[in-house]
Amino acid sequence: MGIREDVFYEGGPHVGDLIINILLAFTVICLPLTVGAIVRSIWLRYRITDRRISVTGGWMGRDRTDIIYSEIVRVVKVPRGLGFWGDIVVTLKDKSRLEMRALPRFREIYDYIAEKAADKTGKPIDAIAK
C-alpha cells in the first residue's frame, strides 16, 4: 500500500490563458501562441501534493515530471493575465528548471511550494517574487 499524499492543487492551466490566446489568434501573427494555449489546456495537468510536484504534459499528455521538495533551491512567480493567473519557475539543486505556466491560484501555490521546500531542506528557499 502506497503512502498517502494530501493534494493541495490538481488541475490544468487557467481558462483565461486559453481565452486571451484565442482572441489573439485574430491577429494571425499570434497563431503559434494560440496553438500552444490549446495544447496546454487539453494535455497539461498539474498535481501539487505535500510530497511532490507532478506535471503531466507534452503531446497527448505522455510526458510526466515529478520533483520532490528537498531538491528545490529557488522558486519564482510571475503574474500573468492581470494577475488572475501566473507562472511559477522552480529551480532544482542540479540547476534544472521546471516551469509551470498559467497556474490559477498561483500566489497560494507559490507560498505552499516555498513553505514545503523550506521545511524539507531546513533552510529558507531563495524565493524571489516578481
Image (cartoon, rainbow, N blue to C red):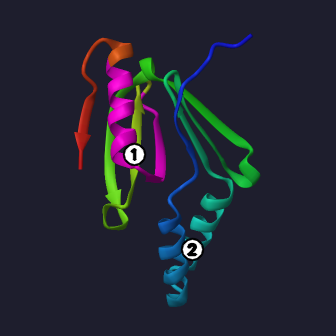
> Which numbered dot is residue 61?
none
Residue 40 vertical placement versus 115 (above, below): below
Can I make out residue 16 in this image? yes
> Which residue is disc 1 drawn over?
88
Q: State the residue position of label 2.
A: 34
In terms of image quadrants, where is residue 89? top left
Rendered residue at 32%/52% (across/down): 78
Count of residue discs: 2
Magenta residues (range):
95-118
In percent of width and height, residue 112 lies at 37, 32
In the displayed structure image, the side of residue 16 where residue 116 appears, left or right: left
Q: Is residue 27 above or below residue 31?
A: below
For the point 55% across and 83% down, which residue is it?
25
- Does 61 appear in magenta? no
Q: 121 and 5: which one is in front?
A: 5
Label 1 sits on what residue type?
Ile
Percent x, y of residue 1: 74, 10
The residue depicted at 43 percent of the width and 17 percent of the height is 70
**23 or 30: nearer the eye?**
23
